[in-house]
Amino acid sequence: MVVLGGGAFAAGAAMGAGAPDAATASVALVTETPQPSATPTPTPTPDPRAQPQAAAAPAAVRTCSVAGLATDSRLGTFLGSVRDASTGSVLFDRGATTYARTASVMKVLTSAAALAVLGPDYQVPTTVVKGAEPGQVVLVGGGDITLASGASNIYTDSASMLDLAAQVNAAWAADPSTAGTPITSIVLDASAFSGDRWQPSWNRKELYDGYSSEVTALQVDGDRAEPGANVSARSENAVLRAGQAFALALGAPNAGLAEGVATAGSAQLGQVLSAPVSTMIPDALLRSDNTEAEMLARLVAVKLGVGGDFGALATAIPQALATYGLDTAGLTIVDGSGLSDDNGVSPNFLTSLFIKIQNREGNLAVIADGLPVGGQSGTLAGRFTDSPAAGSVIAKTGWIDTGYTLSGIIDAADGSVLTFAFFALDDVGDSAKTAIDALTTAVYECGSNLSNN
């Protein structure tokens, strides 16, 4: 009985200081004088110790390797990450935490930032107000580089300078103070963006080769010499070219043109709006339009109030992307298009962002639906054409002189969904695309059985 009492006391004590009455009762029970007429049968005391847990099931062994393809010399300095989109786990890692230049994959970050800050319905205004001098109007750019000099251009649903000029002429004629007098001077206000109009780390040949214009808040046709061509030489002065197009549309080709700033409170004579952001983003992604991406990046910075120059992007883009719950601490952002070698984004960051895109979080469905598709559309139309992964690689391409990149979503052969980012950097040529595509196809075939070995 003493032994039983000691066990009962221990059991009560093990239940903790929160139950003193129960412990006392146990002690009192075993110290009473036992009745000779009965011998009580001991009641088993539950063992308060934790019971052993069942052994965890062994982790699945993934056996499908792409290691040989990842060491292809055509990939130069290779970085890569592949994640299972349903779990977020990294299946494949080759320097995946290294921050490096992304080339045009940067446009995905810019697009996600624009959707977070501007929203899919935002439209960019171009406005004309009355000038401070007789016969003068001020053309105020809000940042819309898609504005058409004529009826249309390469951009989907672009606003037209012809419509804007018609509004101005009508308002000019309806005002008794100006009716019957000519427009003799046009002030060109591009002050919505500030600082350098060409990022110092960019190669100037991109302008002459027709891949990008200067970054200005006032221009037409993306400053293309051929408004309907994707690749077209750009001018040395995008703002002046926009002014010339407006003067012609007004029917005042001899009007004087000079840059300046509109006077606050000036009477509005006309305004046109760009297509919404939800239309511009697929344009920028499918064509990999550098000028359109720079416009979106700069508008994000202006909207956030952190500045209107290139330097503001280092704050604006990470701040916008952080709203998706992403860790942006390591990002280095110097432009919105990816032309610079000085940008820094890791493959792991991209695969995390693409999980958000795959899940269509917030307004990111605009990106999911607007990306090029392997063998079918945009800059991937001519790639994966003979691959089993055709139609199943939804991704953004990238190319600059020092690297080729590809990042996006793979609807794998086994039904799993993967996100991936592959960088082929440094001494690489056009054949790097072939090597990247072969690696991507192999990942498609491995699916969730992809091994990191």
Image: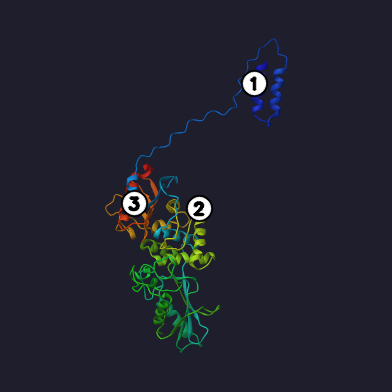
**How many numbered badges does the structure rendering display?**
3
Q: Position of residue 145 (x, y in %)?
A: 42, 70
Disc 2 residue type? Answer: Asp
| Residue nearer the viewer, 248 or 365 | 248
Q: Residues within 10 Å of mark 1 (few under 14, many from 20)?
A: some
Give the labeled residue for mark 1: 7
Give the labeled residue for mark 2: 327
Q: Residue at x 73, y 14 (%)?
A: 33
| Residue nearer the viewer, 204 or 239 | 204
Between discs 2 and 3, the one toward the N terminus:
2
Judged from the image, the secondary structure of the residue bearing numbered disc 2 is loop
Give the labeled residue for mark 3: 392
Disc 3 residue type? Answer: Ser
Q: Position of residue 260 (x, y in %)?
A: 50, 79
Judged from the image, the secondary structure of the residue bearing numbered disc 1 is helix
Residue 305 badge: none
35 lies left or right of 343: right
Judged from the image, the secondary structure of the residue bearing numbered disc 3 is loop
